[in-house]
Amino acid sequence: MLHSAARYYGIVLDWKKEPHRRFNPLTREWLLVSPHRTARPWQGQTEEIPVVRQPEYDPQCYLCPGNGRAGGKRNPVYTSTFVFDNDFAAMKPDTPLDRFEQDGLLLAAGEPGVCRVVCFSPRHDLTVANMELPDLRRVVDVWVEQFGELGAMPLVNHVQILENRGPMMGASNPHPHCQIWSNHSIPNEVGKETASQRDWLAQKGSCLLCDYARLEQANRERIVDENSDFLALVPFWAIWPFEIMLLAKRHMTDIDGLTDRERDSLADILKRTTARYDRLFNVSFPYSFGFHQRPTDGESHQEWHLHAHFFPPLLRSATVRKFLVGYEMLCEPQRDITAESAAERLRSV
Ligand SMILES: [Zn+2]
Ligand SMILES: [Zn+2]
Ligand SMILES: [Zn+2]
């Protein structure tokens, strides 16, 4: 189907070898794919980095049970998960919504919000990939509780659950945890995805990501893994080399829509995906992860389809990463290996 769409001056473009652009229907932005460049010789470093074994408990860690935090508070001796307000929150709930404007050029608005931290486990040395499924299921339950609690706050119109894993992604502490940023405005990326899903529903009468999940399930080329309720795939429009999207197979607007079984399935696909990542380059794989779901602004947002993004920086080995620089900053994202070959690599480990 893409083959015929790619006809140009009577020549059929081989989109697995020739430079081309791909369209992301969620953000409605294009990216450049240069698969011919994967043949060029690689001269960078490819050595493996030594595995740093973490202790089960670190007396210096501000997230471990019973330890003091920088803000002067002390963690309880928690035994499963632990949620607290971020001591260095990027937003505060009492910020006024005042706006400032000058000549349409200088525009600013106060942004109230609540930022929390969720410790996944009392164990300092675990990651999502090596946590037990019942413990990961407890983390899913906490996410659902927090989405409901924060989303119900009048000042909160969007709740972002996110995990930065590994120093390469700026995670200063290896203790397994995530952050939740909830605030008044709809952030840029969520705003783009809201508009595209809303327009798709209005124009086609169907859900964009339900339609996409159906297409990928029929094609299978980009599917990396799946269970009864979730797909893990490299999206056609992936920017990061081994980017993965988790898609709920059933239509739901948010994690609160998950059934009991689907919560278990989410824990399962998270563990399988992160363990697969770890096997790819034999390293605890760094990534930024987060859910995308409906805004909590009081509307039903039937256009929204629950999904999650993994954005991992690694390209060729434990030490060789992709940078978004130069052309990416000035023009648009670019990748070398295709989404299809990345999916094939990920399926093979
Ligand atoms: Zn710790
Ligand atoms: Zn859907
Ligand atoms: Zn998204």
Image: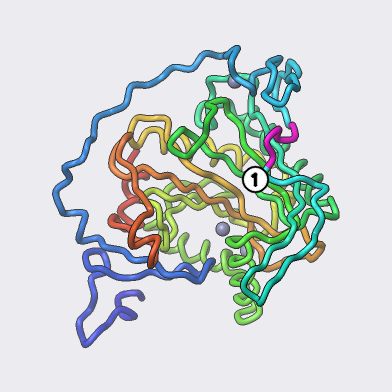
Question: Which amino acid lies under the numbered mark 1 shown in the image of this protein?
Answer: Ile
Q: Nearer the viewer, residue 161 or 106?
A: 106
How far across and down, in percent of the image, does residue 312 sit?
A: 43, 44
Identity of the residue drawn at 36% across and 44% down:
346
Please say if 307 is above or below 215. Answer: above
Decide if ligand 3 comes within 8 Å of the CB at mark 1: no
How far across and down, in percent of the image, does residue 251 sit?
A: 65, 60
Q: Splitting the image into 4 quarters, where does residue 65 fall?
A: top right
Q: Nearer the viewer, residue 10 or 84?
A: 84
By secondary structure, the bulk of the magenta-drawn segment is best described as loop
Label 1: few (<14), some or many (≥20) within 10 Å?
many
Q: Splitting the image into 4 quarters, where does residue 136 fall?
A: top right
Residue lying farthest to the front in this orientation: 102
Query: Residue 93 lies in magenta, yes or no?
Result: no
Please say if 325 is above or below 199. Answer: above
Identity of the residue drawn at 67% across and 67% down:
107
How far across and down, in percent of the image, does residue 189 sit?
A: 58, 61
Q: Is residue 63 left or right of residue 169?
A: right
Identity of the residue drawn at 77% across and 41% down:
145
Residue lying farthest to the left in this orientation: 41
Please say if 162 is above or below 158. Answer: above
Q: Provide the residue designation for mark 1.
A: 161
Name the quarter showing ligand 3. Answer: bottom right
Please say if 162 is above or below 110. Answer: above
Q: Quadrant of the N terminus?
A: bottom left
SS class, disc 1:
strand
The number of numbered discs placed on residues in the rendered structure image is 1
Q: Which residues are magenta?
A: 84-89
How far across and down, in percent of the image, does residue 52 sit?
A: 41, 19
Identity of the residue drawn at 28% across and 42% down:
316
Q: Is residue 184 left or right of residue 124?
A: right
Residue lying farthest to the bottom in this orientation: 9
